[in-house]
Image (cartoon, grey):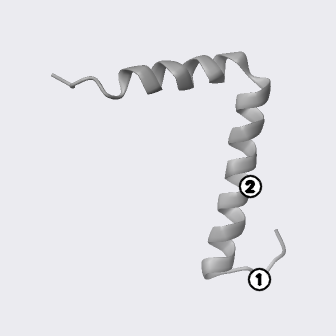
Amino acid sequence: MKPGHTGLTHLVHSTRYSWKGLKAAFRNEAAFRQEVVITALLLPLPGG
């Protein structure tokens, strides 16, 4: 990211980089994929 990006521009660039990192982790890391699946399955359960 270029110096001087602030406010909304910074947020947009940061979000883009984060999304790219999450996609790379999902594509390349089996443990990350397993955690995503487990989270998706358990999230709808009532918390007790």
In the rendered image, the vertical position of residue 20 relative to residue 15, given as above or below: above
Which image quarter: residue 17? bottom right
Instruction: Please state the horizontal and vertical placement of residue 40, each as a whole percent of the image.
Output: 45, 26
Which image quarter: residue 2? bottom right
Q: The C terminus lies in which quarter of the figure?
A: top left
Q: Is residue 34 left or right of residue 39?
A: right
Instruction: Please state the horizontal and vertical placement of residue 23, each as a whole percent of the image.
Output: 72, 39
Element assignment for label 2: helix
Q: Nearer the viewer, residue 44 or 29?
A: 44
**Residue identifier under label 2:** 17
**Residue identifier under label 1:** 4
Instruction: Please state the horizontal and vertical placement of residue 27, each as a whole percent of the image.
Output: 77, 29
Q: Residue at x 61, y 79 (%)?
A: 8
Outermost residue to the right: 2
In the rendered image, the vertical position of residue 39 relative to residue 8, given as above or below: above
Q: Nearer the viewer, residue 2 or 43?
A: 43
